[in-house]
Amino acid sequence: MIHEIYPKVFFNQYDPSKRPAAEDRVIAFAGREFLCRIEGDQISYPSYSEARAAAPDDAAFIYAFDISGEDYYLCRTPERLSIEGFEYSDISTYGKVFPMDRAYAAIIAFHLNNWYSSERYCGRCGSELVPDGKERAMRCPKCGNLIYPRINPCVIVGVINDGKILCTQYNRPNAGRFALIAGFAEIGESLEECVKREVMEEVGLKVKDLRFYKSEPWGMSSSLLSGFYCRVDGDPEPHPDGVEIAAGRWFSREDLLEIYTPSHVALTSDMITKFMRGEVTEESLFGK
C-alpha cells in the first residue's frame, strides 16, 4: 500500500524552526498537478536550490515532513514554477511510479497542500489565519481559533459469504472496475457502526462478525481508511441503492483470478488481493 515504504521511515512531526538546505526536496502544486521528473517509472523532485531560483520568495517554502533523513518542503506560489528538466504531472501519477517513498511523498504533500489552500480565513470571525508557531495548525490572531489538518475517517468493507467476496460498482459514467464498499464515518458513530450502515445503505445487507484488517492514510481524499472484513447476517442477495451504487456482485477467488489486476498502492486492492490469493479466508477470519 502507498504508505508501506520500508526500509524508509516517514517522520511527520512538524518543526517550524526548520529552514531548507540546498539538497532538500521540494514539491510544488498547480491544482491537481505537481512538479516532478519522471524517467521510465522513476520519479524525482527538484532540490531547494533549484526551486529557490524559480521562486525567489523564501516565505513560499513550508516544511512538510521527513523521510529517512530527507526533508521535504511545499512550495506554495500562485504561479507555476519553471525548472529545467521538471514538468507538471497529474497527481494520479503516484500509482505508476517508484520508489514508493517518493510516490508516498506526493500523496501526503497533496493532502497538506489542499489543507493549506482551504484554511485561509477563520470560520468563526473571518480574520485571515496565520501559521501556528508550535504545531501543524493555522491560528486566528483575532479570536484564537486553532485549525488542524483535516483527516476524514473512512471504512473499506470486504463482505465475505460462502467463499465469495462482495464487490460493487458506482452509479456514474466510466465507473470502472468493481471495488469494495466504502464510505465516510458520520458524526457520533464508531467505525464498526459505520461499516454496518454503509453496507446497509449501499446494498441492503446486514453484516456481523466484523474483523479489523489494517488502515491506510489516503491523501487523495484527505482520509484515514480503516479496512474491515465481515460476513452476511441473513439474506445474501445484494440490492444496490441505484443512486450511489449501480451493481453489487459476489466474486469467487476463481472469478477474481481471471479479471482482477492488483494495485500496489490501495487498501481496497490489498484486501481483494488477499482474498483472491487465499491469504484471507472465512476460516482464518471467523473460524468454523
Image (cartoon, rainbow, N blue to C red):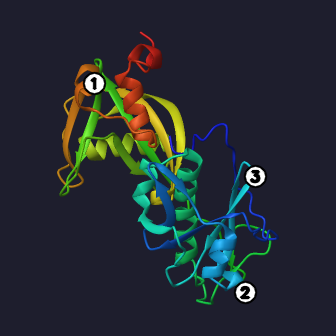
Q: Residue at x 52, y 54 (%)?
A: 43
Q: Amino acid at mark 1?
A: Leu
Q: Amino acid at mark 3?
A: Gly
Mark 3 residue element: loop
Q: Residue at x 38, y 24 (%)?
A: 275
For marks 2 and 3, the one nearer the N-term is 3
Q: Amino acid at mark 2?
A: Pro
Please tell me the numbered disc located at residue 141: 2
Q: Position of residue 245 (x, y in %)?
A: 22, 49
Distance Cα–Cα, label 2 vs label 3: 33 Å
- Residue 260 placement, left or right of 3: left
Q: Position of residue 252 (x, y in %)?
A: 25, 22
Mark 1 residue element: helix
Q: Which residue, given by chain and number where applicable, does mark 1 sit on?
A: 257
Q: Which residue, given by chain and number where applicable, does mark 3 sit on?
A: 69
Label 2 vs label 3, nearer the camera:
3
- Residue 264 placement, left or right of 112: left
Q: Position of residue 107 (x, y in %)?
A: 52, 57
For marks 1 and 2, the one nearer the N-term is 2
**Residue 284, relative to residue 258: is it above or below?**
above
Distance Cα–Cα, label 1 vs label 2: 57 Å
Q: Residues within 10 Å of mark 2 (few under 14, many from 20)?
A: some
